[in-house]
Image (cartoon, rainbow, N blue to C red):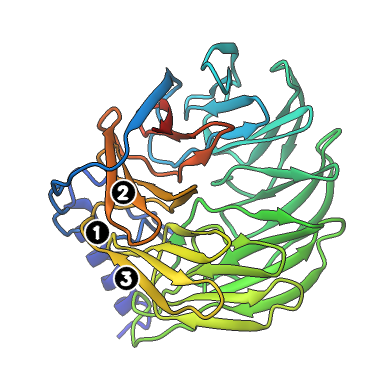
Amino acid sequence: MNRLAPLKILLMLAATLLSGCSGLGEKVSTGFGLWGGQSVGEKPAALVEFKPSATFKLDWQAKVGGAGDTVLFPAVLKDDVYAVGADGKMARFDADSGKQVWDINAGYKVSGGVGAGVGLVAIGTARGEVLGFDAAGQQIWQARLSSEILSAPQMADGIVVARTGDGRIFGLDARDGKRRWVYQRAMPSLALRSHAGVVISRGAVFAGYAGGKLVALNLANGNVGWEATVSLPRGATELERMTDVSSLPVIDERMICATAYQGRTACFDASSGNLIWARDISSSTGLAMDERNIYVSDTRGAVHALDKHSGASLWKQDKLFARRVTAPLVLGHYIAVADMQGYVHLLTREDGSFAARIATDGSQIGAPPVALNRGFLVQTRNGGLFALSVQ
């Protein structure tokens, strides 16, 4: 029997299961990895009734192009919001009022969302280009990379960092887009199709990878500082052994934490990569951190609160089962998550109970909520931008 036959059968089975999940908007990517990874094929839990202890306020809303089959992250820089649709239409808004400052058509199919830094806005395309724009929306450079860009480019210290779908990370000069360095590692034959990019902090670039790895790179030259294992593959088949860090890590002054699909949630010393603690909690969407706790949205839709220093469980909110919950956002005394039907849920930070809920436009919110000067922002698959605050 052909050695590849079992893997082909598994991929066909995965494709059949995923294609039969109406309303989830996810698919199998032929040739490289699976989309999603969260409660596929299971019936989403009905919304529970509760007595609100807080109220959402819609501060403003706007519209950009729809996301299509990708997840597009908006960017917030000081008093400005930048957002783009898959059709290449990008706009800048005032973060407080929602007033549109400008809009342009980049002329390319966008797959990577928006990154913003001082004087520079960058987006990634399905053809593998990074496009750099000035603050007025004028394109100033274009860089061609190795494959499609699935995440928002990030920038710091004069370097734009972009990640491609084939696992490479590129460091580009922010002035002209010329390549400064590239990091490359081998990828497994089957992996989640991830829209997670990189996190830049204190001169380092942090990125999670298929196979459960977390790497720290030098921002200036791309050299590897350390590599850590979030989770090890387990199981007999390729599908069972998938354990990918497919969301962004979170970092503070001392530690960095990441979570893996079909794996663990773990925290490491940010300077050395040494493991501090790990828990068997699987996630494909991500986590958040405050001064006391780690908050994780797991693959079944539950939101967990863990003690930041020990990993001990504090509470679990499991009433959002199979609703494809985003990574959490910490908002003072509350935690915000969004779901596949466009609802935003507010949980109390102390015990995870529901505090408030608001509907947007009914389409999936795939990217995590983004903090604003006042409140936060979500972008829906249909291209809706909703700026919300908590009363």
Q: Secondary structure at mark 1?
A: loop
Q: Using a 10 Å C-alpha cutoff, classify the residue at mark 2 as few (fewer than 14 neighbours), some (14 to 19) or many (20 or more).
A: some
CA gap between label 3 and label 2 equals 19 Å
User: Sequence order check: which comes first, mark 1 or mark 2?
Assistant: 2
Q: Quadrant of residue 67?
A: top left
Q: Residue at x 61, y 51 (%)?
A: 164
Residue type (three-letter) at the residue carrying disc 3: Lys
Q: Marks 1 and 3: CB-CB under 8 Å?
A: no
Front disc: 3 or 2: 2
Left or right relative to 382: residue 108? right
Front disc: 1 or 3: 1
Left or right relative to 157: residue 386? left
Q: Quadrant of residue 221?
A: bottom right
Q: Which mark is residue 40?
A: 1
Q: Which mark is residue 8?
A: 3
Q: Marks 3 and 2: CB-CB under 8 Å?
A: no
Q: Which mark is residue 26?
A: 2
Q: Marks 1 and 2: CB-CB under 8 Å?
A: yes
The x, y position of residue 167, in whole percent, is: 61, 60
Closer to us: 320 or 159? 320
Q: Secondary structure at mark 2?
A: loop
Residue 286 drawn above or below residue 95? below
